Each structure stands twice: as C-alpha cells, then as structure tokens.
Image: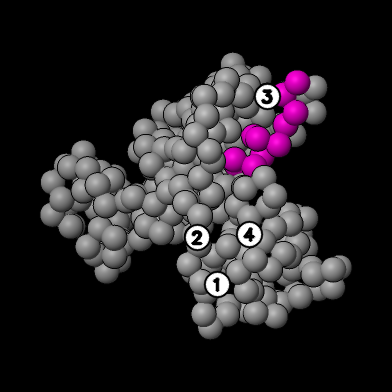
Amino acid sequence: MPAERGLVVEDAVSGFCGAVVGFERGYDGEHVRLEDRAGRTRIFAMREAAFLIDGVPTTLTRPTVVSAPARRLTASGSVAAPVRRARTARASRIFVEGVHDAALVERIWGDDLRAEGVVVCSLDGLDNLAQVMAEFAPAPHRRAGILVDHLVADSKESRLTAGLGPHVLVCGHPFVDVWEAVKPERVGITAWPTVPRSEEWKAGVCRRLGWGSPQDGWRHIYGRVSDFRDVRVELLRSVEELIDFVTSVDTDSGR
C-alpha cells in the first residue's frame, strides 16, 4: 500500500502506532517516519509486511508524490510544540559518549528534549559507563538511555554495554565516531576516509581531508549540520528510540 501522508499504521514489532509524516533513506533501504497522537515521531524500515493496518500485515511503498508538511517542524522533524514555560527536568537521562555527541544531539533534538524535560549527559568516554551507571542508579522511575558509537557485534562497545539492567536502554550506530553519522556530502566530501585502527580516527580523518586539528575538523562539521536531513538514519532512529524510552515513564507513580 502506498504510504500516503496521514495514513495511520502500526509497527508490527514495537506496536508504535502513528500517521505517516515523511520518509528517510538509510543504508538498509527506505524508512517511513510515523507520528503518534502525542506528536512524537519514530522511523521504521519499510520492510515486507512490517506494518499492520486494521490488524492486517501490510507492506508500505513510497508514494510518487508526497505533499509538504503544513505544520512547523523542529530540527528533528517533529511537530513543534506550542511555546510554554520550561518544564522540570525528568529523573531519567540520556547519556552520550562525548561532547561532540552531546552537541549534535542538542542541535537536532534540542527543542524536543527541552519540551520533554530530558537532560543529555556526557560520559567523557564509554570506559566511564560502569561508574556513571553505579552513581546514577537506574530505577523504574529513573531510566537511562545510552547512545553508543560503533555498536556492532563483538566490539569493545558491545561488551561495555552488556547486562546493564532492565531500566537501561542502549542504542547505537555502526559508525566509528558520531562525525561519520553526518552525511559526507553535507561536509563537502564524497565519503568518509578509511583510517587504520593503529591511528586515532579523528586525527586521521583531518589529515586525509586537510582539515587541520580535530578541533578544526569538528567546527567544519558542526557548522554544516542544521537538522535531521544532515545525518544518517541510523543515528536518527537510535536517538528517537532513546527519547521514547526515557519519556514513557510515569514520573509521579514510578511506572
């Protein structure tokens, strides 16, 4: 069935139900963006029979013509919430590996996070994760969402994030660093260079591209990212899943 804007479908795996509001293209094919009644959006791969319509397994296809959204959107692609007083920060938190991850999340999801009262914290390196989680003490009313670079099978990252408990959700992307989650054409290159493991990745990238120091390289990248269209769908999907996880807790009852 063509995924016409406004069509309401349910993701067969997660149960997320929403209306079609847009599309993304990732390494693994086409993705559809759904918006639920609360105005939250999530991205799902348009795989065969991946959605339910009135309980019937359905394969969505991208329509030939997609109308432009009439409502004002945030940098993440979500519907902008009405202007209101800042809400008290939730007990739940999202943790990222470093300051570049935090800055990129703020640039794209900052409006959404402020509207939901979610604070993003830097771990200053994934090696500090165990200590930070021990101090944070995740609980039913205080969840921890963790965004991880290079989260692939048998990696150091996968080992460090294993077995953190039921109140912690780890989401990641396959890229070596969050820099690589930025679409290369946005920063004026055709592809991110390959850097040997023996070489520090950011410094190696900057040497190969003539960007100077890693600090200079980050300024070059950050200045060219303005919204969700500038980054890979793998990062979008992970951050939005983490936001859903930490905002789905009833902070008054602890559920």
Between 9 and 183, the residue placed more toward the observer is 9
Q: Position of residue 81 (x, y in %)?
A: 54, 41
Give the percent coordinates (x, y) of residue 167.
71, 31
Q: Position of residue 237 (x, y in %)?
A: 56, 54
Q: Nearer the viewer, mark 3 or mark 2?
A: 2
Amino acid type at mark 3: Arg
Is residue 251 found inside the magenta-colored segment of the image? yes
- Separation of marks 4 and 3 at Cα, in angstroms: 27 Å
Where's the C terminus, which quadrant? Answer: top right
Q: x, y (%) of residue 207? A: 17, 52
Query: For this view, does 126 lie left or right of residue 136?
Result: left
Q: In the picture provided, is 132 more to the left or to the right than 107?
A: right
Q: CA distance from mark 2 to mark 1?
A: 23 Å
Query: The disc labelled 4 sits on which kind of residue?
Result: Leu
For the residues labelled 2 and 4, say whether their Cβ atoms are less than 8 Å apart.
no
- Which residue position is annotated with label 2? 70
Earlier sequence position, callout 3 versus callout 2: 2
Report the residue marked by disc 4. Answer: 34
Q: Which comes sooner in the sequence, label 4 or label 3?
A: 4
- Sequence-wise, the earlier of marks 3 and 1 is 1
What is the secondary structure assignment of the residue under circle 4?
Answer: strand
Please say whether residue 40 is one of the residues in the magenta stretch: no
Question: Could you tell me which residue is drawn at 70 percent across and 50 percent down?
Answer: 37
Q: Which residues are magenta?
A: 242-252
**Helix, strand or loop at mark 2:** loop
Say few, some or many: other residues with alpha carbon within 10 Å of mark 2 (under 14 / 14 to 19 / 20 or more): few
Q: Quadrant of the N terminus?
A: bottom right
Per the rendering, the mark at residue 30 is 1
Indicate the amino acid at tag 1: Glu
